[in-house]
Image: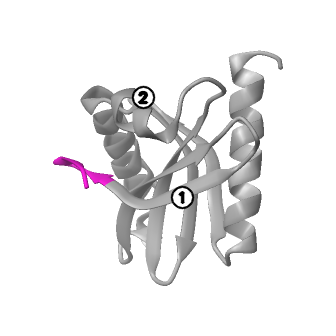
Amino acid sequence: MGSSKAKGDTGEDLASHWFSEHHYHIIKRNLRSPTGEVDIIVYRDACVAFVEVKSWQGLNKLSLADSIHSRKRRNIITTARFFLQKYPEWKQFRSRFDVVFVGSEGQLDHFPGAFSESGFQ
């Protein structure tokens, strides 16, 4: 089905489309900072969500916690802080960390507030 990058890009495209259909506003995709990357940043209902997208062929969504280990979560959180420093107009809104799982058949599961600085919810 192609490279891991291509699968990831396709998953992010599907997730972005899903967010748009569900009345989220996409602020940014693929935000990179010195400490990491956030796949998608969206806004809705006075909340900014920093989204990690996982597109997997052979694994299921129960494996998500294993794939988003503490170092990965810390990098996402630090990158979110980088974004909020760079764009202070978003600081006034509450923020959360979401995960989107895109399965082998293109099905999508959204987990709002999936993790925080203390771990998975």
Q: In this view of the protein, which residue sits in the foreground, 50 or 108?
A: 108
Which residue is pictured at 33% across the width and 45% down the height?
A: 77
Q: Position of residue 7 (x, y in %)?
A: 74, 28
Which residue is pictured at 76% across the width and 47% down the height?
A: 13
Q: Is residue 44 above or below residue 18?
A: below
Magenta segment includes 90: no
Q: In this view of the protein, which residue sits in the foreground, 30 or 9?
A: 9
Left or right of 61 on screen, residue 103: right
Q: Position of residue 88 (x, y in %)?
A: 41, 65
Q: Quadrant of the C terminus?
A: bottom left
- Disc number at residue 110? 1
Judge the density around disc 1: few (<14), some (14-19), many (≥20) Cα neighbours within 10 Å: some
Which residue is pictured at 28% across the width and 36% down the height?
A: 74
Q: Quadrant of the N terminus?
A: top right
Q: Residue furthest left?
A: 118
- Disc number at residue 34? 2
User: Is the Cβ of the residue at disc 2 closer than 8 Å to that at disc 1?
Assistant: no
Under tag 1, what secondary structure? Answer: strand
Q: How far apart are the two marked residues, 2 and 1, measured between alpha carbons? A: 27 Å
Q: Hey, which quadrant is residue 11 in on the image?
A: top right
Q: Which residues are magenta?
A: 115-121
User: Total number of numbered labels?
Assistant: 2
- Label 2 vs 1, first from the N-terminus: 2
Amino acid marked by disc 1: His
Under tag 2, what secondary structure? Answer: loop
Which residue is pictured at 47% across the width and 62% down the height?
A: 49
